[in-house]
Image: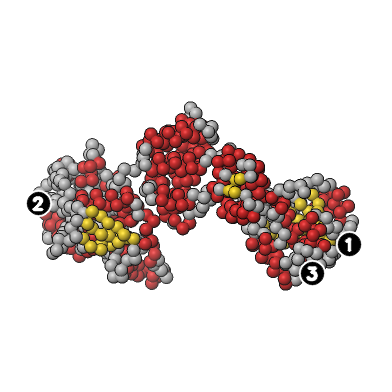
Amino acid sequence: MSYQVLARKWRPRTFHELVGQEHVSRALVNALDQGRLHHAYLFTGTRGVGKTTLARILAKCLNCRQGVTSVPCGECETCREIDEGRFVDLIEVDAASRTKVEDTRELLDNVQYAPTQGRYKVYLIDEVHMLSTHSFNALLKTLEEPPPHVKFLLATTDPQKLPVTVLSRCLQFTLKNMPPERVVGHLSHILEAESVAFDEQALWLLGKAAEGSMRDALSLTDQAIAFGQGEVRHADVAAMLGTLDHRHLLALAEALAEVDAARVLQEVANLAEQGPDFGAILDDLAGIFHRLAIAQMVPDALDNGHGDRDTLLPLAARFTAEDVQLYYQIALQGRGDMESAPDPRTALEMTLLRMLAFRPQGVPKPPQTPLPIRGAADGESPATAAANSPAAESAPGQPAAADPAPGQPAPPETQAPAAGDISPVADDGGEDVLNASPEAESPEAEVADVEATSRVEETPPPVADAPDDAVDAALEDEAQRQADAAGVADVDDAPPWALDEAPAPAASEPSAAAPEPPAMDVVAETAEPEPATPTPVVATSETGAFDHGRWLASFDALALGGLTRNLAAHCIVEHDDGATLALRLDPSQGAMLADVHVERLTKALADQGIERRLNITVADLPEGLETPRAQNERLARERHAQAVEALRRDPHIQMLEHDFGAHLLERSVTPTDGAASDA
């Protein structure tokens, strides 16, 4: 007996043997069981996904000697003839070779006659999109109202080419591509039944090469069995397909994880010996970084498309999220630069070395970049501008600057600018100091600060007629009172709205009408802070241990950034024995735990005077203890509620609601840091 290829030998004979098309088989099985049969079916999908197979199974179900059923017997004469392709009432037409209208008319001439052997006369037209326009026109009427004993089964790989008039007359079923997991599982079953030795990694190569087609996968398996002398081995399949061994790419990724440039270049040299497509290598490497990012963020969502899931999960823990994102972006950029490179290998090596050269070092908390009106003056260094920031002004251990005496004229360089002038104001030390909110962590907060500062600068003071010393003293006292009411220790730290809303003091003596005075800038002047080492902000408890309360109080001072900050924000302090600090991590963030984050957190604590060996365990958090993240979310909700309440008390808002029927959108309210004012 001649050899029968696997694709034909293992072609499904029933709906229950069909692999990967459950959404189609379920609909057809239910229709057969309930007797709700349509007269025309259209099966669409790429090559080798089971269109013709489904049509033959349906024809067998319609003509089985045991009656119309979703489970044909497979033993009667009709079932055997359909399986062998010689059933007279199953007319298979290759539309690619019979495109003329004369062929279609000849086919339709026999539609009116009853079936010879079976219950239904089934017309299976494959690649129906190849028919000519006239052929479709000739088919339309019969396709819409065929005789009761006729069923049309159409199959095509390109349904877009079918006329809408044909689509509207058929029940359309779109068959899915086979994922590599499904292909590997089916090939494993077939090879075990065939008693063929195989490697699972070899099947993953075949599953990927099949590109969603089960027929292609079986044909490649036949080729691999012949190539491997009766066995399917990984090395043989890789050589047969001419594809790059995926293990080389994983080795390259491991070299990047170790930040070993010499090993990276050696791996590239090993790849070059196989004469690969270097552009494809970079594409595959970008795909690995994509899967590493998924493994870090949502480990359960990581697919096993290459059979390397168990390898990628531990590899993901050796990268930081910042490294993975940067490497992915550099890989994409390097792929686009390959055309301009001297040769592809040079482009690949430079791209890999660029990944190592620009990888984040320590990933500290990024410095706050001020907006132009709050930035450094000409000639001032970024470090000096950072020293003059509100955070530097309120840092522990730094002396507060003394305000100039009321009535004393300011030096020429400290004179207030005219209205609308937003240039920085310099104090006696030559440094630029501007009034800003205590924390400008986000661009939205900075924009709010700019608007508040602009309102202060552009609004003429209502006490222009009062003497300068009385005005300065009154404004200073009222600003300090507003700052105290907002919970700010000093007027220099008061947010702009507190100064903007200060009521005007009564004028001490009247004066003659004068032209509109220039706008006044309310500026908090401070002396340049002296450079000093950071003062530890964590106070020790009575027992000298670092407890959870101190962990919450000092978290922001640790200046962590990126994934390390996110990881630490989900931790609580379990105990501290003076040598080891034990933290407990929320299980939802357990996949993020890596040695690099432990090292960064240990260093940040040491910089604050807490030198401990850090031990982080993943376990459920006890009730009643807030993580830094939970605390920040609670405080944010409270500030938002206070801001909403303040807006509802505002007379202007009340007037808009009363007169115009306006409604306050609470979700659009963004409170400024540190206060919920009555502004």
Residue pictured at 62% horizontal, 47% vertical: 210
Residue 646 visible, this orientation: no
**Would residue 617 appear left or right of 34 to someone viewing this image?**
left
Residue pictured at 37% horizontal, 38% vertical: 260
| Label located before the other in sequence (3 or 1) | 3
* Residue for badge 2: 405
- Tell me how far mark 1 sits from mark 2, CA to CA: 115 Å
Badge 2: few (under 14), some or many (20 or more) residues near its Cα, within 10 Å? few
* Residue for badge 1: 116
Residue type at numbered disc 3: Gln
| Label located before the other in sequence (2 or 3) | 3
Image location (x, y in percent) of residue 280: 53, 38
| Label located before the other in sequence (1 or 2) | 1
- Tell me how far mark 2 sits from mark 3, CA to CA: 108 Å
Residue type at numbered disc 2: Ala
Farthest residue, direction top: 342
Secondary element at image label 2 = loop
Q: Nearer the viewer, residue 155 or 285?
A: 285
Q: Nearer the viewer, residue 259 or 648?
A: 259
Residue type at numbered disc 1: Thr
**Would residue 49 appear left or right of 596 to someone viewing this image?**
right
Residue 505 has which mark?
none
